[in-house]
Image (tube, helix red, strand yellow):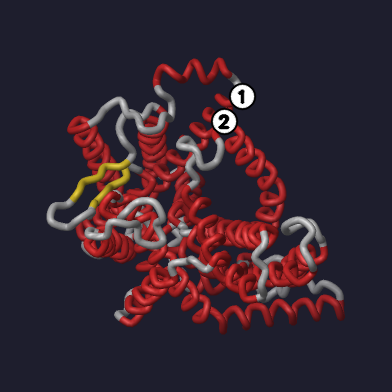
Amino acid sequence: MVPLRRLLIVRSAGELPYPEGTACAEVLRATTAAETGGRWIFIGLAVGAIVKLAIGAIVLIPSTLAMHLPVLPKAEVALEIAPALLAVGYILGYRQSSILVSGSLLSAIVLTPLIALVGAGLPAPMFPEMKLPIAAMSAGQIWSRYVRYIGAGAVAAAGLVAVARALPTMWTSFAAVVRGLRRSELGGAPAPSPAMARTDRDVPAWVVLIVPIAVVITLIAVPNLLAGDMPFGPRLIAALGVAIFGVCFVVVSSRIVGLIGVSSNPTSAMTLVTLLGVSVVFVALGWRDPSARAAILTVGTVVCIAASKAGDISQDLKTGYLVGATPARQQLGQFIGAAFACWAIAGTVLLLGKAFTFGSPELPAPQATLMKTVIEGVLAGSLPWGLVGSGAALSICALIAGLPGLSFAVGIYLPLGTLAPVFVGGIVRRVVEARREGKVPESDSGVLAASGMIAGEGLAGVLIAFLIAAGTKWTGLREALAPIHFAAKDFTHLRGASAVTLGIAVVLVVCVLLFRAGRAASTSS
C-alpha cells in the first residue's frame, strides 16, 4: 500500500473519495476549528448508536425490510436499516451509489429470477447445490448458492483489470523503492530532501521492501507454520501465492474502499479468488491431501488480512492527506497497531468460536462455509466454473460500456439489502447538491452528520459484541440481558406492518437529518 499512496490517495483524489477517511477528516477539522457545524457530528453519532442498539441489541424491529416482487419468480428487493450505510451513500454521492446498486439490482431481479426459471421444473438439485432443488430454494438461498459465484467471478475479473491498469505505477513505485534502498546501502540512510514536503514523506524504502520479503521467507523456511509437516515444494508455492495475490489484492482493496468504504469491502470475494488460484496450482501439481487444504486456507487467510488492512490504511492515509499529516508517522503507527491488534482479534474470534461454535445458527459464518466449499470443490474437481466465468463476462461488458467495472462487480457480489440504503443516501446527496445551485461550501455539515452516524453505529456494534462475548463467561450478565432478548436471532419485538412502518420511518428520519445537515452547510456558505 505504501508505494501506491501517491497514486491512490493524492493523484486520484477526485476519483476516489474514501468515505470513512473523508468523514474522519471532516470530524477533525470541525473539532479543531470549533465550527458550529461540529454539532452535527454528535447528532449523527447519537442517531447511529441509538438505531444500532435498538435493532442489534434490543431487536425492536428486523434489521432488513424485504419484499417479494410479483411476476418475477424469487425476485426480492430489500433495504437494510442502517444509518451507517445511508451515510456512506451520502458521502459517495449519487453516481457511485447508483453504479453499485445497478449491479445489485442485476443480481436480485435479473439473475436470481432467471436461475429460478431455469430450475423450476428440475426435480433434483442443480449443481453446485447438492440438497435442495431450485424450486424449493428461497431467493436468499439462490443468491448464496449461485449468484454469489457469479459475483465472485465479476469481482475477480474487474480486480485483475484494475491490477493491470495499476501495473505501470506499481512498477515505477517499486523501482523507486529499490533505488532508495540501494542509496541507503551505499551511503547510509539519507536525510529527507528539503524539497520533499513533510506531507509527502513515506517510511524508508528498506522497510517497504524487507518486511514483505521477510514474511514470504518465513512462510517458506518454517516447516510447521503453514499446515503441519509439509514438504518444501508446497511451502514454496504457498508463499509465492501469498506474495502474488497479496500484492494484487492490496491494490484492488485500496481502490474499492476508496469508492464504497471499508464496511462494504468485498474481502471475502478477494479471498475466494486467492483460494481458487492457489487450489488450481495445487491440483495441477497433484497435492490434494488434507495438509494441502490447510495450506490453501492459510494463504487465503494471509491475503484476506492484507487486503483488509490495505483498505483500513488507505482510509487513514486519506484522512492524513486531507488534514496535512505526515504519512511516514501514520505508517509507523499502523505497524505498531497491527502488531498489538492481531492478538486481541485472534482472542476475540477464538472466544466467539468457543462460545457459539462456528457454523451454528448463532454463528453461521457463511463466507467461511463458502470458502470451505470452494477449496474442496477445486481439489475434488467440482467447482462451478461456468458461474464464475459468467460473472467475469458481465464485468468485462460493464467495462466495455464505460462503467467502472469494479464498482459494478462489487454491486453484483453484495446483496441488494446492503447497497439499497447506500443508493438512498446518494439520492439525498443529489437533492442537497441541486438545492445548492452549484455552490460548494467550505465544510459540509452533511458529511459531518454522516461521519457521526458511521462512528456511532460502529461504536454501538463494538459494545454489542463485547456484551455478547462477556455473557458467554459471566452467567449473571447473560441472565440479566435475557428478558429483553438481547441480540437474539430470529426474533423481534415488533413484526408485520408495525415493524415495516417503523423501519421506513427510521430511514426517512435519517434521510431528513442528512438533508438538513447538508442544507445547513449551503445556507451558512
Q: Nearer the viewer, residue 173 or 485?
A: 485
Q: Quadrant of the C terminus?
A: bottom left
Q: Are marks 2 and 1 in contact (CB under 8 Å)?
A: yes
Q: Give residue 371's position: percent from left, percent from top.
A: 52, 57
Residue extending farthest to the front is 123
SS label for mark 2? helix
Asked if residue 241 is positioned above or below residue 263 in the image, the reply reads: below
What separation in Å lies between label 2 and label 1 (alpha carbons)? 7 Å
SS label for mark 1? helix
Q: Give residue 121's position: percent from left, percent from top.
A: 22, 60
Q: Nearer the viewer, residue 56 or 86?
A: 56
Asked if residue 243 is positioned above or below residue 397 in the image, the reply reads: above
Q: Give residue 93's position: percent from left, percent from top.
A: 32, 60
Residue drawn at point x = 43 percent, y = 25 percent: 486
Residue drawn at point x = 70 percent, y = 59 percent: 291
Q: Amino acid at mark 1?
A: Lys
Q: Nearer the viewer, residue 262 or 120?
A: 120
Mark 1, other Cα within 10 Å: few <14 / some 14–19 / many ≥20: few
Task: Kindly indicate the quadrant of the structure image that contains residue 147.
Answer: bottom left
Q: Nearer the viewer, residue 283 or 154?
A: 283
Question: Could you tell me if residue 425 is visible in this image?
Answer: no
Residue drawn at point x = 51 percent, y = 81 percent: 164
Which residue is the site of mark 1?
A: 473
Q: Amino acid at mark 2?
A: Ala
